[in-house]
Image: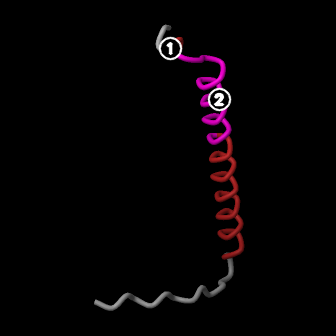
Amino acid sequence: MAPRPIKAHTSKVGDEGRRRSTLLHEQLIAIVNFLMLLFFAFTGILYAVILPGDSLWCW
């Protein structure tokens, strides 16, 4: 089966609001991904540096 051709995006009335909300949604996803990256980097540094050796397993 041949792949279906990609339709060109045609601008309509009322399409501007949808594009703005999509952009806001993408920015929100980017911010959440950045915060998760900071969180995991912080916990990784915490486990690697502040809890050295076998003290990681001794709660």
Please indicate whether residue 5 sits to the left or right of residue 23 in the image. Answer: left
Residue 13 point in image, percent of width and height: 68, 81
| Count of marks, rendered view | 2
Which residue is labeled 1 in the image? 54
**Which labelled disc corresponds to residue 45?**
2
Region of the chain picked out in magenta, as a range: 36-54
Q: Nearer the viewer, residue 43 or 33?
A: 43
Q: Nearer the viewer, residue 50 or 23?
A: 50
Q: Is residue 17 above or below residue 30?
A: below
Q: Residues within 10 Å of mark 2 (few under 14, many from 20)?
A: few
Residue 16 point in image, percent of width and height: 71, 74
Which residue is found at the position 60% from the left and 26% from the top? 48
Q: Residue furthest left?
A: 1
Residue 55 point in image, percent of width and height: 53, 11
Which residue is found at the position 54% from the left and 17% from the top? 53
Report the Cα–Cα distance between label 1 and label 2. 16 Å
Q: Nearer the viewer, residue 10 or 41?
A: 41
Q: Is residue 47 above or below residue 24?
A: above
Q: Residue type at mark 1: give it.
A: Asp
Q: Residue type at mark 2: give it.
A: Ile
Helix, strand or loop for disc 2: helix
Helix, strand or loop for disc 1: helix
Q: Residues within 10 Å of mark 1 (few under 14, many from 20)?
A: few
